[in-house]
Image (spheres, helix red, strand yellow):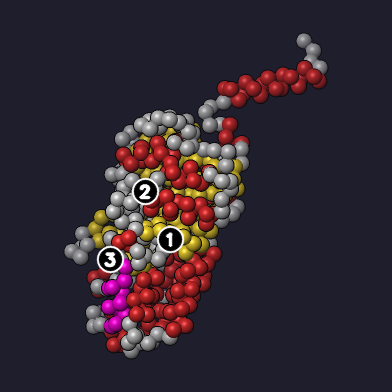
Amino acid sequence: MKFTTKSLSHLSVLILGVLLITAPAGAAEKIVKKEWAILTFLNGFNSLDSFGYLDMNEMEKVGSTDQVHVVSQWASLRNREVKRVYLNQDSDPATVTSPIVENLGLVDMGDYRTLVEFVKWAAVKYPAKHYFVNIWNHGNGWHLAKSRTGGMSTRDVSYDDISGNKITTEQLGVAMAEISREIGQKIDIVGSDSCLMAMAEVVAQMKGSVAHFVGSEEVEPADGWPYDTFLTKWNDGGNKTASQVTSILGRVYLDSYTNGRDATLSGMDLSKYGALATAVRDLGEAIKSQPAASRQKILQAATRAQSYTNDDYKDLGDLIDQIRSDATIQIRPEIIAGAKTALSQFITSNYTSARMSKSQGVAIWFPDAVWQFDSYKARYRALTFNQDTAWIDAIASTLTASHLY
């Protein structure tokens, strides 16, 4: 049979149609560059496994749209497998029906390199102009959970109970730097559907590779984010900026916990981090220059400031307010005002329940006990935030003045 140009054209269309029909589920989406991709690193290799199933089904209530790729790397303790899933809309609230694009078997979800590989893979298969990387798991801010008696539990973020590993704050910074280099741009949003991660010490590690961060100062309820209402609001009304996305998430998150449970969720603009770090450094220098009696008062102010499940995590804005409210502390007004201004520019959205109303968007380390200070001081000195602010020296000066150290 001879093929004319016209017949070749018809055959090409036929072949293309066959390829599309026989392509694996989810394959068609990989060639479409959408406005956004939300990439959830869902580590259920721990006590939160059942909530992973719930959240995957919440994502499926909306699924991927013309504007947003919804992709998860989903680890389940139930079957000890890690699956890469492209989320499509379905009406089954109990079963995840979206296509499994890859089954990785058993891999270490507590290894930051696993996170990097997932995002690299997703950016190739499901390209987007903007990326939201979401780390779903237990979290504990920048340090481990440690009691006064020395008992320890988990630390940092993404606990894998099978491997015994986790992603440290320092490794989180390394991961985001590698991802940013791979995709050729800053990651538009990094989020933590995890507890206690909205800390200056955490976001500072990512300052060069991430544009916006969203997370909670307090422990999150186990239900975490309401993915169905979040994705619905995100897709409603056209394209959204990163700050709009984080604000939508904060609003629907708070609305989902109107039953009296404590909730905080805030968005941060990391392009304003430099000004915040400078203001905190200036505040720290002012604290160190105070007479001993005044530094004792500052430590007392820190004990009054809004704290969280880890009581050495203090809300930065409320800490500043507590210092300002004590007329015996003679820190120059322009230092206080500068810190508050830098904070207000850094925080793009802040949603809190009634009992958390003094929370202003970002926590900072300020232990008021020597055992806490001694437990973490060596590691803290090396953190990017401390390198930028020398904050640990301000803390130490209040403990020394109070004859606690």
- Residue 358 seen anywhere in this rendered image of the structure: yes
Calculate the distance from the C-alpha at mark 2 to the C-alpha at mark 1: 15 Å
Q: Amino acid at mark 1?
A: Asn
- Position of residue 98 relative to residue 381, above or below, is above
Contact? badges 2 and 1 (CB < 8 Å): no
- Which picture quadrant has residue 363? bottom left
Which structural element holds mark 2?
A: loop
Quarter of the picture holding the N terminus: top right
- Position of residue 67 relative to residue 196, above or below, is above
Q: Residue at x 60, y 52 (%)?
A: 184
* Chain part drawn in magenta: 296-306
Calculate the distance from the C-alpha at mark 3 to the C-alpha at mark 1: 20 Å
Q: Residue at x 38, y 30 (%)?
A: 95
Mark 1 Cα-neighbour bin, 10 Å: few <14, some 14–19, many ≥20: many
Disc 2 target residue: 256
Q: Residue furthest left?
A: 149
Residue 236 position, x and y percent, is 53, 44
Which structural element holds mark 3?
A: loop
Give the numbered dot on residue 280: none
- Which picture quadrant has residue 198? bottom left
Residue 239 position, x and y percent, is 58, 48
Q: Is 109 on the left or on the right of 240, as rendered?
A: left
In reply to whether residue 303 is colored magenta, the answer given is yes
- Position of residue 380 relative to residue 122, above or below, is below
Q: Residue at x 41, y 63 (%)?
A: 361
Which structural element holds mark 1?
A: strand
Sequence-wise, which precedes: disc 3 or disc 1? 3
Quarter of the picture holding the C terminus: bottom left
Disc 1 target residue: 350
Q: Amino acid at mark 3?
A: Asp
